[in-house]
Image: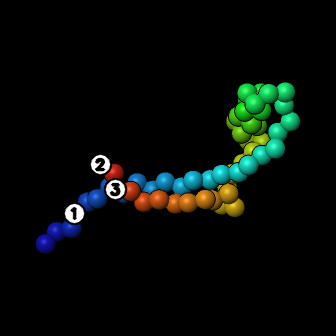
Amino acid sequence: MSEKIFKIEIQEVLSDILEIEANSLNEAILKAKKMYTEEKIILDEKNHVITEFKISE
């Protein structure tokens, strides 16, 4: 009997909460996005929240 091929999706969630000084919530979000894009914020294994395994179609 031959083995079948299955597609399994692996998702990892990384998370961190930052305190950002800004004049508005929108400005704070923009600052966070800029910092992330410029790699001033780097999420790694210490920010790991969950790993999920799902069947992929």
Crowding around mark 2 (Cα neighbors within 10 Å: few <14, some 14 to 19, many 20+) is: few
Residue carrying label 3 = 55
Q: Is residue 45 visible?
A: yes
Q: Are marks 2 and 3 in contact (CB under 8 Å)?
A: yes
Coloring basis for residues: rainbow
Crowding around mark 1 (Cα neighbors within 10 Å: few <14, some 14 to 19, many 20+) is: few
Q: In this orientation, which residue lies closer to the viewer: 53 or 23?
A: 23
Crowding around mark 3 (Cα neighbors within 10 Å: few <14, some 14 to 19, many 20+) is: few
Q: Secondary structure at mark 3?
A: strand
Q: Classify residue 7 by image quadrant.
A: bottom left
Q: Is residue 38 visible?
A: no
Q: Classify residue 27 by image quadrant.
A: top right
Residue carrying label 1 = 4
Mark 3 vs mark 1, CA separation in Å: 14 Å
Q: Secondary structure at mark 1?
A: loop
Residue 31's spot in the image, x, y percent? 77, 32
At 49% from the left and 54% from the top, the residue drawn is 11
- Label 3 amino acid? Ile
